[in-house]
Each structure stands twice: as structure tokens, then as C-alpha cells.
Image (cartoon, rainbow, N blue to C red):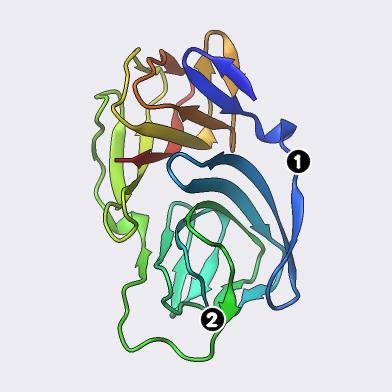
Amino acid sequence: MIKLAGFEIVRIADTPWQKRVRFDGRESRFAMYNDDLENGLRMSIVEYPLGSVEPRHVHPGTHATTVVKGRALIDGLELKPLDCILGPSHEPHGPLEYPDSCTLFSCFQGSNDHSEVKQLGSERHYRLIQADKLAWEKSESGAGEGKTLVDHGAGRLLLRAVSFAPGATVERHTHPYMRASLIVTGGAVIEGEHFGVWDFLYQRKGVEHGPVHFPDGATLLSVAMR
């Protein structure tokens, strides 16, 4: 981890991938960015190999999981990069198919213990969010455009996609709550250091950060615990 300009930064190149054997005996792998005990939120990147299928399942915790590479098939929909799956606590969802392999950014609150189930529940609160169906709006910083992927159904979690044009800069400022960002496309420059795709920026609440420059533009996933 690098501490720079108010950020705690994790480069994906320096982060070990760990093998995970799922409840159905199949393997995937993940890299942990941050286990935020204060906010009860674990943020990681997960990779499913070619042809993987995640059976219909439940878990005690709640997740907002976003495709960052490849595609996922669920409920007759094809989810592409920036599309999101909101999986509520104790509600069956899936199966999920990953025909071409798939990489996802996971924001998980609570227990991650999965159990396979055969049927969906009588009520459906889980959501599939397709980013292309959401309009871009001026971002909070004024330096880019954003769209809200998840703002309810996951407790205090707010998940947004934010796009910055080439040459944009987010000036120095603070937030009243925790913020984290994953670079999905493009790159960022902070105090002369360059960060690229799947690098992760974490900012504690009340800590001043920045500025952040985007010389070639960038798309980020922005996480906040309100």
C-alpha cells in the first residue's frame, strides 16, 4: 500500500491473487483491496475462469458486485462492464454464467458464506443494474460525469460510475464519509505517480486528498459509506 496525498493506494500489480474454492467445489481467484472493519465493508476484485457458472445461492451478507471485464449472464440478461448485481442478505439469486471468463469488483457487507439453493424466493429484492440505461450527470466534484448504480438496498453503501475527460482534474478536498475508487479504464496521476486500470484509491472520512489528474481520461467506480 502507498500513502500519498491523503489516499491509501493499492496497485493491482503489487496485490497477491488468492485461490478461492467455492461452496460448489469450483475455483475462482480474488485480490483483496481493503477490509474496512470500521464500515463493515470488504472490497476486492474477483476473477472467474472461462466457462464458470455460479449456482443460485444465498448468503447472510449483502453485496454490490460490478463487472469490470468480460460479461455475466443472469435472468436472460447480459451484464457488461459497469453493470452491477445487488445481492441482498438471505435472498436467493443466480445462477450466474461467465462464458468468456469475467472479472468483477465486489463490495461485500457481512458474512460471505454462500449456500446453494434451487429456487428463487417469493419476493425479489435483488437487482440487476445495466449502466447503459442510466444517464450521465455532472459529478459531485464538477470535474466529470457520473451515474448512480446503487443508492438503496445495501445499507449505507453508495456505488457510482464516474467518467473524466482527458485533462480533467479533481481538486483537493475532503469528504464527510469514507470514499474509495477503482480505476476501470484510463489512469490517474497523483503527485507525479501514475496509476492504472484496477488500481484502488481509498480515502478515510474527513481526510483531505488530492489533487488527482486524469491526463488521458478515466472511468472509475466510486464507493462511499454514507
Residue indicated by mark 2: 56
Q: Is residue 198 above or below residue 94?
A: above
Identify the residue at image location x=57%, y=25%: 9
Tell me residue 31's x, y (percent).
67, 46
**Residue placed most toward the observer, 204 or 107:** 204
Asked if residue 79 lies left or right of residue 14, the reply is left
Q: Secondary structure at mark 1?
A: loop
Q: Give the numbered dot on residue 16.
A: 1
Q: Position of residue 122 (x, y in %)?
A: 33, 89
For residue 184, side relative to residue 33 (left or right): left
Q: Residue, x 31% and y 48% (percent of image)?
A: 156
223 w.r.t. 152: above or below: above
Check disc 1: other Cα within 10 Å, few if <14, some if 14-19, many if 20+: few
Q: Amino acid at mark 1?
A: Pro
Tell me the tag on residue 208.
none
Considering the image in quadrants, where does the N terminus appear? top right
Task: Indicate which disc, 2 or 1, sits on the residue closer to the N terminus.
Answer: 1
The answer to whether the residues at label 2 and label 1 have Cβ atoms under 8 Å apart is no
Amino acid on which the number 2 mark rests in the picture: Arg
